[in-house]
Amino acid sequence: MSTIVLSGGMEKVSGIKETASCFLMVAIVFVSPVQAKTIAQEEIPAAVLAGLKKHHQDVGAITVDKETHFGLTLYEVKFETHGNQHQALFDQQGRSFAHEEAINIQQLPTSLQLAVKKLFNQSTVKDAESIQHPDGRIEYEIDVLGDGVAWELILDNQAKLLSKERD
């Protein structure tokens, strides 16, 4: 039995390239949904469920947020596999936009840990997620308490800071 919750919607944007602008859109989608609406499982497009099954065969119960960002409808599917929390973004046609997986902060690459330490005099990593894009790029979303302030950082796999926002 699946649990489904959907939020918002965007229309198809043709020609989106896997560039920094696409990254920013995905980061914004994961971080701040524009609209949220709970829907029944039977309301989830078959293409979204097929896309989920194609990329993640061992999914059980799911929660789905239907979100609208910049005029594009995306479905954020939340699920758990082997004890790990995941979020995957799909468009209405079932195409994958990104896959986010919670990771143990001890699993953060050393280069990322060092990059965080360079940003703050004092810091504590609260949690971290890896974000895999359809083109194979991997980025990391890291929630940090830095110098007494909560921050959300986005770094690429080379430890380059892409985004730093107060959380």
Image: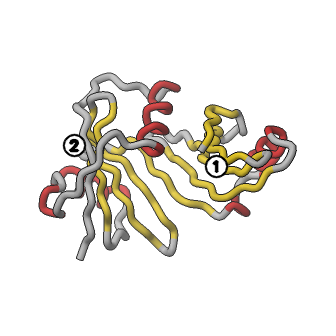
Quadrant where the N terminus is found in the figure: bottom left
Q: Position of residue 54 (x, y in %)?
A: 31, 57
Mark found first going from the N terminus, 1 or 2: 2
Q: Secondary structure at mark 1?
A: strand
What residue is drawn where x is 45% and y is 50%?
Answer: 99
Disc tally is: 2
Q: Position of residue 167 (x, y in %)?
A: 59, 45
Question: Extreme top residue here?
Answer: 15
Residue ID for mark 1: 142
| The one of 43 and 33 positioned closer to us in this rendering | 33
Determine crowd level at label 1: few under 14, some 14-19, many 20+ residues with C-alpha closer than 10 A.
many
Determine crowd level at label 2: few under 14, some 14-19, many 20+ residues with C-alpha closer than 10 A.
many
Task: Quote the CA–CA distance across marks 1 and 2.
Answer: 29 Å
What residue is drawn where x is 23% and y is 57%?
Answer: 38
Q: Secondary structure at mark 2?
A: loop
What residue is drawn where x is 64% and y is 51%?
Answer: 143
Give left or right: position of 2 versus 84: left
Q: Position of residue 53 (x, y in %)?
A: 29, 60
Question: Extreme left residue here?
Answer: 42
Residue ID for mark 2: 92
Q: Is residue 71 above or below residue 50?
A: above
Question: Extreme right residue here?
Answer: 121
**Residue 1, numbered label:** none
- Quarter occupied by residue 12: top left
What residue is drawn where x is 81% and y is 41%?
Answer: 120
Q: Amino acid at mark 1?
A: Ile
